[in-house]
Image (tube, rainbow, N blue to C red):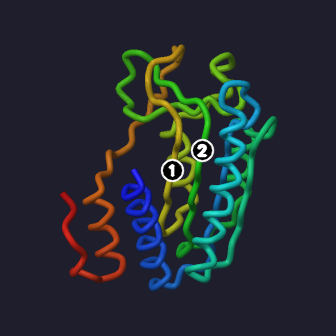
Amino acid sequence: MKILRKSFAMCIIYILFGVTIANAQTIHTIVFCNTIDQSIGQSMSIEFLNMKNQVRTWAGLIDYDEDHHELDGRNCTRANLKAVIDDMDVEPDDVILTFYGGHGSHAENDSDPWPQYCMNSGFENQGNWVPMASLQKWIEAKHARLSVIISNCCNVVQGATTKSHYGLWEVTTQDLMDLIAKITKNSLLPKVR
């Protein structure tokens, strides 16, 4: 697990470093976590702080300007997330990085392979949920050079009845390494099995 975390962190740094070479200006980050749920709120509070510090460290390492947003507790809602994204002033060479921590679910018979974020409502208020595919579409509309979506949530049928109606691509570790090689023009990166 420790090797996987280091590999993941290095992939993110390589990706962001590669975009730096391409003259990116700003990294727009959104860290949003369900910190008020009785079953996971305490651990999500710790994760929220850890991830907030991590994205700031990444921004400092690659010398980007930073546009950082946080949504936790009662502020971790669909409406607030959409408003933050809508208000972002994104230039073509910028990067958007999002992190969600909290409950996730998946509607039975839904062809979308990605989770729906339960936000701060747990499993009760599906109208507040955000399908990962919707987040991807909202971010894609900002036309950033690179978008990274990181999620720490379940993706199993746990009470979801509403399908997300969107699809995303499945990305493998090799796909990420190929992307890094293309961005950095470094064909010497090792092949990942």
Residue at image position (53%, 66%) is 144
Displayed quadrant of residue 42: top right
Displayed quadrant of residue 34: top right
Instruction: Look at the image and tell me in which quarter the C terminus lies.
Output: bottom left
Q: Which residue is mark 2?
A: 100
The answer to whether residue 23 is left or right of residue 113 is right
Residue at image position (53%, 35%) is 153
Residue kind at label 1, given as amino acid type: Ile
- Please say if the residues under marks 1 and 2 sit with CB atoms less than 8 Å apart: yes
Q: Which residue is mark 1?
A: 150
| Label placed on residue 3 | none
Q: Where is residue 97 drawn, in percent x and y?
A: 56, 59
Residue at image position (38%, 55%) is 4
Residue kind at label 2, given as amino acid type: Tyr
Label 1 crowd bin: few (<14), some (14–19), many (20+), radius 10 Å = few
Question: Is residue 148 positioned above or below 36 on the image?
Answer: below
